[in-house]
Image (tube, coloured by chain):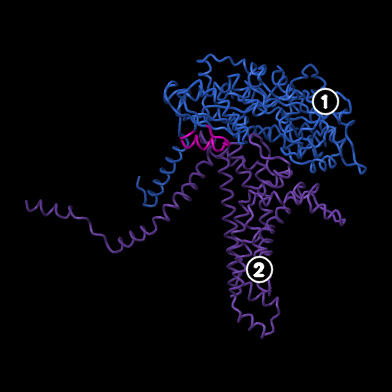
Amino acid sequence: MAAVTASTAPAGRAPRLTARSRRRLSVLAFLAPWLVGFAMFFAYPLVATVYFSFTRYDLFTLEYTGLTNYRFLLGDEDAWRAMGNTLWLVAVMVPLRVLFGLGAAQLLVHVKRGGSLLRSVFYLPYLVPPVAATVAFVFVFNPGTGPLHTLTEAVGLPWPDWFNDPSWSKPGLTLLGLWAVGDVMVILLAALLDVPRPLYEAAEIDGAGPWQRFRHITLPTVAPVLAFAAVTGVIQTLQYFTQAMVAGKVAAGQSDQPGTQTAPGYPDGSTLTFPQWLYDEGFRQFNMGYACVLALVLFAVAMLFTMVLLRQFHAFADGEA
Amino acid sequence: MRTTRPGRAAAVLAATVLGLTAAACTAGRSEPGAGGPALGDRQTIQVWHGWSADHEVKGFEQAVDGFRRKHPNITVKVTGNQTDDQITNAIRGGGPPDVVASFTTDNLGQFCSSGAWQDLTPLLGRDGIDLNVFPKAVREYTQYKGKRCAMPLLADAYGLYYNKRLMKGHQPPRTMTELADLAKKLTVRNPDGTIKVAGFMPSVQYYEHTPQHVATQFGVRWLGDDGKAVFARDPAWKAYLKWSKDLLDWYGYDNAKRFMRSMGQEFEASNPFQKEKVAMAVDGEWRTKFIEKEAPGLDYGTAPAPVSDDRAAQYGSGFVLGTIMGVPRGARHSAAAWAFVKYLTTDTQALVTLANALGNVPSTLPALSSPDLKLPAQFGTFLDVFRHPGTTTSPSTPNGGDYLVKLQQFVQEQWEPGKVKDLDKALRDLDAKVDESLRLAGG
């Protein structure tokens, strides 16, 4: 009996947790909300995307097709054209937006009167809904009926075809991006206002000119913010969709009537961005498996850009330090 | 086999993901007409359609009233402004409406092949519905590989609109040669050579002048019996392409582009036909309604679109397509849903009510002759095109009619600007591209 008692007693008690285990559980409990969110909204979609990329999936039926989707990508001219357009926008629009944002912020830092009014002027366009802004831009820039064309024609200046010309459509979108530069401008303005004044005063005493002060004080100090603007700009531009699609549709004179099937990217595929092609494959052509391949490519390119940019900015900041 | 802790965690995660994924891919299966309450039971059905304008929504409700009177035990809840994406999401979510309608007829291949819309063939047979009440082309665009998973609900027919004042006494052309000749005669140029009034703009970039609506008049085929593209194999394609390029080159490509850039929006009052900037245009029957509203003073007539010279006997035929209606898989009131679809798509009074309200062609042959049809005099052309035995449509594919988009892209980007040196080779390449995409989609 005694033996029975001796053997059952420890089993009835909960095992004691070591301090280390208790600490781990506490950490896990605090992390749990994030872990659940991460698993639901990142890990699961990512793993599912990889899985679907090996299938023919039309949103209802699913069939394993191995590497077929990946092989198709190699010969898909539209996908490569879309990637080319997107990389063009990344290479041109992102640096220009950062430079323009920095220039506007510098101007606002140094302006003596009417600073708040100018801040509003630069920031307000960013608040205009992208669809409305794009429609307005295409109409204003229209080479046939737009007011800007009428104005330039009156003074005898040439006027490109903008959104109707494959060579000018992406520059047109870039101008639209520069017009709505308020998001970049506002964070760079905050960064510029944060640069310690004594540094400028000391440099000035040492005989540093405006360019030297900007190059050796302003730039290194705001470098992390510039890196942030560049990285988020690249990621946003890799996902560039609404403005390009609306500009193409409006310039083509096609209202997006339900039931109509048209190739995206008017004129001549010049405004076809990678996310547009991804959407087209997934939701117009019902090739969701192939769309997943495109999504993974986009993910990989975004990761690559982010890593390279962060490395470059770290190297720059370290060098200056 | 022993696994490490991270290995076990990964296996559990993978199994969970695959389980969830498989569940997501198989939600909401049900058999046609089966499941849910019987037709005579008291119930409420949900109907989704895409019309959104006030007069359209009102017209739909009026057409549904007849069903309500016939089946007082069934409450019909109608939701307008629903897109294909919303319908697809509802089906995938397992809680679809009982009846759905789509404007995107080109998606029918996917609706049928994926089983997203139920096959209505057994129900049509059971209820003894004579499909001959629908013209051949309409029967064609509501089925895919023998599966009839939709019924036609009104149709769009295409014909030639002509401005009587700009025609200067000429009769509408009957052949493509006559059309090109007349287009040249009616074109008015500005002193600098730019186009002031175009007789007929052959470019595919001119709104409804897509290959679907114009090349059809050359008797083209789209896909062969083997399901592959026949742009290179069918000589009618070359005839169409050469005809359109010749006329476009007569205008001058840059001149034509310049004209098209300044001609306004298709579905607004600035439409160039309504603004008398073009003398003739191929358009859908709906334009009569737009003209009535936006350009009531326009003196215009309609006629069947001209045909290629070798097909003079086919004059009067044209291209048709239309809204489709069906029962999605997972519908909870299948019997009532089918009764509703059957009523709205075959009852003459319902179709006439809808046609009058929406300005579309009623989609059965008996409805075409209804004395209650109250549409403008110019509408008669489209009724005739619709009932013509030579009228055709474009075939369904599982990738949303992507071959149409690829063809249009080729004509717009390569052919019209004159970038194609060897048309045969270019068409063979186009065929290969279309076939490759069809293969990817399992077509």
Among the chains, which one is purple? A
Badge 2: residue crowd in 10 Å (few <14, some 14–19, many ≥20): many
Residue B422 is inside the magenta segment: no
In the figure, the blue chain has which letter? Answer: B
The answer to whether residue B411 is seen in the rendering is no
Place of residue A208 in the rendered image (x, y in percent of width and height, measured from the top left): 69, 81
Amino acid type at circle 2 is: Ala
In the rendered image, which residue does mark 2 sit on?
Answer: A105
Q: Position of residue A291 (x, y in %)?
A: 58, 42
Q: Camera-side residue: B174 or A76? A: B174
Is disc 2 on the same chain as disc 1? no
**On the rendered structure, is B303 left or right of A245?**
right
**Chain of the residue on which disc 2 is drawn:** A
Query: Can you say whether A101 is above or below A62 in the image?
Result: below
Res. B57 visible in picture: yes
A21 up-or-down from A68: above or below: below
> Position of B276 compared to B80: left or right?
right
Residue B375 figure quarter = top right
Secondary structure type for disc 1: helix
Q: Are marks 1 and 2 in contact (CB under 8 Å)?
A: no
What range of the chain is rendered magenta? B78-96
CA distance for labels 1 and 2: 62 Å
What residue is shown with label 1? Answer: B176
The structure residue drawn at horizontal position 11% and vertical position 54%, both measured from the top left corner, is A6
Q: Secondary structure at mark 2?
A: helix
Most foreground residue, A3 or B375: B375
Q: Quadrant of residue B103?
A: top right
Instruction: Give the mark toward the camera: 1 or 2.
Output: 2
Subunit bearing disc 1: B
In percent of width and height, residue A265 lies at: 69, 44
Task: Return the residue nearer the eye: B398 or A126.
Answer: A126
